[in-house]
């Protein structure tokens, strides 16, 4: 079993360190770890945010665990050299088109939510975000308009085959849950979304036991804070999924709690090849201070063990240890506590 670990920038190395301790505590036989550079640190060392050797390391592994990338010092770089390109490049090169972002409230911890406790209770939603298409990967450019003003543009597009494959992921996931899919789009305005919606309806025919509903993204943003517990599987495009998942994390508690799995079609000996990362970024405002919540990364490791290595019981044990840690009140500052990143790691290890 080979895991490639890419700590990245900012709080990335801090949160990955705690996940690595948790992984070590499992003493998995036959596990090999590899470490690579991504993001701003890779740009500084190798002149590129996603060096060829890092990409090669990812391809040779059964799974990748990534911290976060991003550095304000790189904001002035051309787009191709920005740290964020490392993540986008990995997703595209590895064809990881399905991003699963579970947002589930922790029992008895609804007070951690940014919402009223009654509304935050019993959230159990899976955001299925398409990850290799949409305006993220459309052609981009800069022109001048007739009056000489600069114009920036990004092409937004989905072809039906891209929508079809993410639809199947969402419907398959719904079959093992409450059998409801909510497809979020902007079909009242965007042609991209009209293709999206038509394709969702077409794929739904293969899943007679799953109900499909549609919602415009503006309404969805509102319903997500008004009644998040009503949502089972929420499937949407790359950009809307990015935005709605940060919002969902605050409904549960904090962005420091929300894990993700990015999957494609490639199978490994033990499961599906995937890249696992917290949904948050490098958090430059708190980096290097031991304030970051490592839970999202530790929970991403649990998803890695489940989906890529077939280690369901280890995954569940980690999830239980994180939940018990939260319930014991060992909380970082984002959750109103005073525990350090490492103290949360210690508490999870003690419970494991
Ligand atoms: P961010 O997610 O890094 O931070 C947003 C806010 O949440 C900040 O106040 C931060 O302190 C807080 N936060 C984030 N993670 C936390 C954690 N684990 N514990 C406690 N608090 C946490 O988003 P941003 O500030 O918009 O972006 C910062 C940089 O990260 C940018 O360069 C951006 O492009 C990049 N980014 C990378 C990823 C990724 O690597 N997957 C995701 C999002 C943003
Ligand atoms: C995320 C991040 C990335 C995205 C950025 C860093 C490219 O925000 O993983 O949610 O927009 O997908
Ligand atoms: Mn994001």
Image: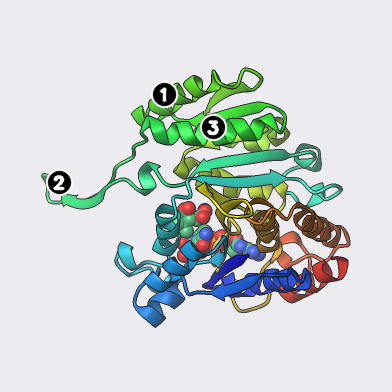
N-term-proximal mark, 3 vs 1: 3
Residue at coordinates 40% horizontally, 68% vertically from top-left? 50
**Which tag is nearer the camera, tag 2 or tag 1?**
1
**Which tag is nearer the camera, tag 3 or tag 1?**
3
Q: Position of residue 126 (x, y in %)?
A: 65, 40
**Marks 3 & 1, CB-CB < 8 Å contact:** no
- In the image, residue 203 sits, relative to residue 9, either above or below, namely above
Residue at coordinates 43% horizontally, 76% vertically from top-left? 42
Q: Is residue 192 left or right of residue 220?
A: left
Image quadrant occupied by the N terminus? bottom right
Instruction: Determine which residue is flagged by label 2.
Output: 145
**Circle 1: element type:** loop
Q: Which mark is drawn over residue 168?
A: 3
At label 2, counting other C-alpha atoms closer than 10 Å, the crowd grade (few under 14, some 14-19, many 20 or more) is few
N-term-proximal mark, 3 vs 2: 2
Q: Nearer the viewer, residue 178 or 14?
A: 178
- In the image, residue 321 sits, relative to residue 22, either above or below, namely above
Q: Which mark is drawn over residue 205?
A: none
- In space, the residues marked 3 and 1 are separated at their CA atoms by 23 Å
Q: Is mark 2 within 8 Å of ligand 2?
A: no
Image quadrant occupied by the C terminus? bottom right
Is residue 76 visible to us here?
yes
Which image quarter: residue 122?
Answer: top right
- In the image, residue 186 sits, relative to residue 342, either above or below, namely above
- In space, the residues marked 3 and 2 are separated at their CA atoms by 42 Å
**Circle 3: element type:** helix
- In space, the residues marked 2 and 1 are separated at their CA atoms by 28 Å
Instruction: Determine which residue is flagged by label 1.
Output: 188
């Amino acid at each position: 079993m080979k895991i490639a670990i890419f700590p990245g920038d900012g709080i990335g190395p801090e949160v990955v360190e705690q996940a690595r301790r948790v992984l070590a505590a499992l003493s998995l036989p036959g596990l090999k770890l590899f470490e690579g550079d991504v993001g701003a640190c890779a740009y500084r060392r190798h002149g590129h945010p996603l060096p060829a050797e890092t990409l090669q390391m990812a391809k040779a592994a059964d799974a990748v665990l990534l911290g976060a990338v991003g550095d304000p010092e790189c904001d002035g770089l051309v787009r191709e050299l920005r740290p964020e390109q490392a993540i986008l490049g990995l997703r595209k090169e590895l064809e990881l088109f399905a991003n699963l972002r579970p947002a589930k409230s922790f029992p008895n911890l609804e007070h951690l939510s940014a919402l009223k406790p009654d509304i935050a209770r019993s959230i159990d939603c899976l955001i299925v975000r398409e990850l290799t298409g949409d305006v993220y990967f459309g052609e981009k450019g800069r022109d001048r308009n007739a009056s000489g003003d600069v114009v920036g543009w990004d092409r937004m597009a989905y072809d039906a085959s891209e929508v079809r494959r993410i639809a199947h992921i969402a419907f398959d996931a719904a079959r093992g849950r409450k059998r409801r899919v909510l497809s979020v789009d902007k079909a009242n305005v965007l042609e991209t979304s009209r293709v999206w919606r038509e394709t969702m309806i077409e794929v739904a025919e293969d899943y007679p036991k799953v109900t499909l509903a549609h919602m415009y993204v503006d309404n969805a943003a509102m319903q997500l804070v008004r009644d998040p517990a009503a949502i089972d599987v929420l499937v949407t495009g790359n950009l809307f999924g990015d935005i709605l998942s940060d919002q969902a994390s605050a409904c549960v508690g904090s962005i420091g709690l929300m894990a993700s799995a990015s999957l494609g079609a490639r199978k490994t000996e033990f499961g599906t090849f995937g890249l696992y990362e917290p949904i948050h970024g490098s958090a430059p405002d708190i980096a290097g201070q031991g304030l970051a919540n490592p839970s999202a990364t530790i929970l991403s490791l649990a998803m890695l063990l489940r989906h890529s290595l077939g280690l369901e019981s280890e995954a569940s044990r980690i999830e239980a240890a994180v939940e018990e840690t939260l319930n014991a009140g060992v909380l970082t500052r984002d959750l109103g506590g005073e525990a350090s990143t490492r103290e949360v790691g210690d508490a999870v290890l003690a419970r494991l």
